[in-house]
Amino acid sequence: MPDQENLFNPTSFLPPLRRVPAFAALQQGLRLVTKLYASASPSESLNLEHFGKAASGRSSTEQLQDAFDAARRDEIEKRFALDWCLRIIASDLTWLSEGEAQTAQDVASSVIAAEAALAEAGPLERLFRFPLDSPTIEINIRDAPLPISKRDSTESVAGSRDSASEDEEEPDGYHTPRSNRHISSRKQNAATAVGVQTWGSASILCDLFARHADDVFAGLDLPAPSMQKPFRILELGSGTGLVGLFAASLAQRARLQPVEVCLTDYHEKVLENLQHNIGLNCNAHQTASVGSAVLDWRDVHDVIQQRQRRSPSPSSQSSWWSNAQAAFSLILAADVIYSPEHPAWLLSNLRFFLSHQPHSRAHIMCPIRLNGRFGEWNLLQIADRVFGQAHESNIHTANPEPGASESAEKEVVLLQRTELPKIKGIGREDESGYVYWVFGRR
């Protein structure tokens, strides 16, 4: 039985189909999913009887209503529930009678149909102001509806530009991406599309930067106004692009010239929405150049792993990032760890992209979530373990090879780990705070 805070979270109560749940268990799950996402008046006549007397007995009506409202607002929980309904629709449900299977699939279909009708209402545009208590910088962001999963889709998608020659060649051989290039043929389901909406960590990181702008840029390898080489910023897992767009505005206010910002993500729909948000905030009068590009962290991770084994690296010549090694003096990421593999992939990307300049920095902000799959997978503990391996005390620089440059000796190291409190009204209900990591080169 889940605790009262997670009582209505689909990740806590929906029975996995692989365990061939009885019809009564499916019916119970579908009943509440319908109430959460397919009811015109979800808060009226909330019946908790099917959750058992133990649950309702130890919780007040107000507490139960708060838990229900929190679950209903949680987009990750919604996505989990909708995917569960899609699996019911696609399954033969052979362990049920024909009538039971038809009933379950009809109810699941009605939930999907109701959600699709809500999605047709269109995206929501919001204005973010930072710092939160005395705003001086404004960013316009469009949050798009989460797409329905295409579970078997492996189709490759090409961007609006096919040829690398259409990008202007930089003196150092690196192309600043201006549009979405090739999207990997790996599956793109709704689980990778959560970036179409803005999450609390992005706001917290922007607010932190707004309050400590001088510290963010202090000591970085900043180009003089007369120099042609740009100061480059990379955002990993950009989502709606709030953090990267804010960094572009912050760099512009700091009178850094020239500045190039590359916003990256993986899912096709996320990239489409990201490009829209770039258009909302960038104009001809802005000195910072902002572009978007597709980036699959696994591809970069594979390259790093092969190099560590001294094996031939996988071919990346067709990727925009093949010439972007050590090209960025500032790397940003907010709320990007959703799977046990992500911390290792993320660290590999820092090793590949972060400039070898001594004051280059990477800033990562992630929420503390101890409930649902985040707690079950111990994602925060995994991140701390992986990032901890890059702590200065654990780095032992090998003797450089003859002829190697000084910059080749520098490793990506963890410089700082800080826990920040939750700010009321920002982020998901299950977020108790935030962890902030800072990396550099040593």
Image: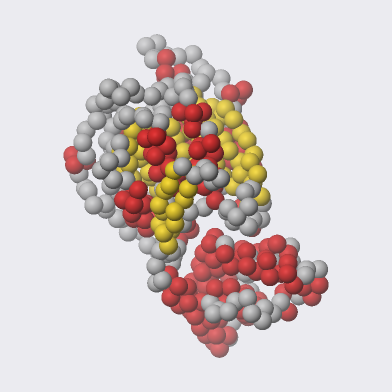
Task: Examine the rendering and report whether any part of residue 299 can be seen.
Answer: no
Looking at the image, the residue that sits furthest to the bottom is 99
* Residue 118 drawn at (x, y percent): 45, 73
Tell whether 375 sits left or right of 411.
right
In this rendered view, identify the residue nearer to me: 67 or 186: 67
In this rendered view, identify the residue nearer to me: 299 or 167: 167
Tell whether 9 sits left or right of 58.
left
Tell whether 59 sits left or right of 169.
right
**Residue plotted at (42% across, 18% down):** 407
Q: Is residue 416 above or below residue 144?
A: above
Way the structure is coloured: secondary structure
Report the number of discs: 0
Looking at the image, the residue that sits furthest to the left is 165
Report which quarter residue 380 is drawn in.
Answer: top right
Report which quarter residue 76 is drawn in.
Answer: bottom right
* Residue 431 drawn at (x, y percent): 63, 52
* Residue 63 drawn at (x, y percent): 73, 67
Q: In this view, does 233 lie above or below 3?
A: above
Task: Examine the rendering and report whether any part of residue 347 can be seen.
Answer: yes
* Residue 201 drawn at (x, y percent): 54, 47
In this rendered view, identify the residue nearer to me: 204 or 353: 204
**Residue plotted at (49% across, 44% down):** 135
Looking at the image, the residue that sits furthest to the top is 402
Report which quarter residue 11 is drawn in.
Answer: bottom right
Tell whether 300 sits left or right of 105.
left
**Residue plotted at (48% across, 54% down):** 198
Q: In which quarter of the image is the N terminus?
A: bottom right
**Residue plotted at (21% across, 33% down):** 169
Q: Is residue 231 above or below residue 139?
A: above
